[in-house]
Amino acid sequence: MIKKSFSAFGLLLLGVVSQAQEIKFEEYDLPNGMHVILHQDNKAPVVTTAVMYHVGAKDEIENRTGFAHFFEHLLFEGTPNIKRGEWMKIVAANGGTNNANTTDDRTYYYETFPSNNLQLGLWMESERLRHPVINQIGVDTQNEVVKEEKRMRVDNQPYGNIMKAIKLGLFKKHPYKNTTIGEMEDLDSAKLEEFLTFFKKYYVPNNATLVVAGDFQPAETRKLIDTYFAGIPKGAPIVRNLPKEDPITKETVMTYTDPNIQLPAYLYTYRTPSDKTRDSKVLDMVSSYLSNGKSSVLYKKLVDQDKKALQVQAINLGEEDYSVFAFFAIPLGTTTEAALRTDIDAEVKKLQTTLISEEDFQKLQNQFENQFVNANSSIQGIASSLATYHVLQGDANLINKEIEIYRNITREDIREVAKKYLNSNQRVIINYLPEKK
């Protein structure tokens, strides 16, 4: 991230990052294809056991959306050795915490225990993979849980369907067109056999990465991993031939209505390259420069100075196959969509034609240095980062190397990437409006 002139603080921070923050780890594969990553840190008596499965919403078939997220819930139902409703109780009774989350590209489960319960964490994750109980009672129960989550977080939340609107606008062929939480009618109509088939295909060792991070002894941990995971049969290879999107070459406009809002929002959305690419990292910097904090370009102009917007953001959402760059603005008073668009486009044009100042560039570099340090400041954060870098970018050591990508981005890179991807003929404008009553 930091490449040119450094302030004294910047030099100090760089020294801390390059020395103290290096994450050491080892990795290997079990014979059944499960990838294992071990990060030993004995400073505190805690350990995280985590498994990331390379399965997300993009792996769902038409009219069966929501399966990946549904399994995030379903696989807490129990196993032949963990009674239904006991999973959370076992974790809590042993001083631990646990959670899971799903994206378009992967599903992630983890437990953090006092380090003397490492064996328990490994056993529980092996139980989840080896023989979870998937029956109609569990499906029906979790279906209601997911419905309630969707009502609370999406359907009844102001601006809760913005991501759905963006996906509908930018994706016509690729399964990113569907939301991660899915459509409830798809889950309602799915048969038990379909859930079993989904599990059998994607929840296999050769589609999983196990991370153990924290206070443990490597030799003993390897033996435990072998005991609990090596005997789980390998699954069939997973082959993805997902459809490619045609380039966007003409500006289009769409309207989405939301019954939960009183003020409209306007979005200017662009389909951009995979998070694996360097250009996606540059777009991270572009979004931060434009709208990260009250001193950012768009906030100062539209919110603080001109009082045209109640809120404005520029966001780069990186994903495995494609990414999304989006501007989001809620107008203030009588400000029109055209006025917001004109001002946002003017700031983009400046980026495309003029180098940002050295002072702004220095500030941007320091922001990313801080983000790097914060992301890896806990054992849970390190475990998540190691799994994500391996599964979605193919290189766990990006936990140490990715910061160099950001440090080597230049002001010229920012200008050229803005010029390459953020043009009006490459976007979908979304008028996100209150539903008329």
Image (cartoon, grey):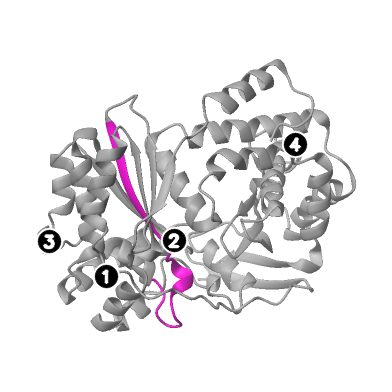
CA gap, disc 3 to disc 4?
A: 57 Å
Q: Provide residue 300's location: percent of width, then percent of height.
A: 72, 37
Q: Provide residue 355's location: percent of width, then percent of height.
A: 86, 40
Q: Tag 4, which secondary structure?
A: helix
Rendered view: 120 above or below 275: above
The mark closer to the camera, 4 or 2, is 2
Q: Residue furthest top?
A: 8
Residue 375 in sight: yes
Q: Residue at x 22, y 72 (%)?
A: 139
CA gap, disc 1 to disc 4?
A: 48 Å
Q: Residue at x 70, y 66 (%)?
A: 429
Q: Tag 3, which secondary structure?
A: loop
The magenta segment is 46-66
CA gap, disc 2 to disc 3?
A: 25 Å
Q: Earlier in the sequence, mark 1 or mark 4?
A: 1
**How many numbered marks does the figure carry?**
4
Q: Earlier in the sequence, mark 2 or mark 1?
A: 2
CA gap, disc 2 to disc 1?
A: 20 Å
Q: Earlier in the sequence, mark 2 or mark 3?
A: 3
Relative to residue 237, is residue 358 drawn left or right?
A: right
Q: Which residue matches tag 4?
A: 305
Q: Which residue matches tag 2?
A: 106
Q: Which residue matches tag 1?
A: 143
Q: Residue at x 33, y 49 (%)?
A: 50
Location of the N terminus by quadrant is: top right
The mark closer to the camera, 1 or 4, is 1
Q: Which residue matches tag 3?
A: 84
Amino acid type, mark 4:
Gln
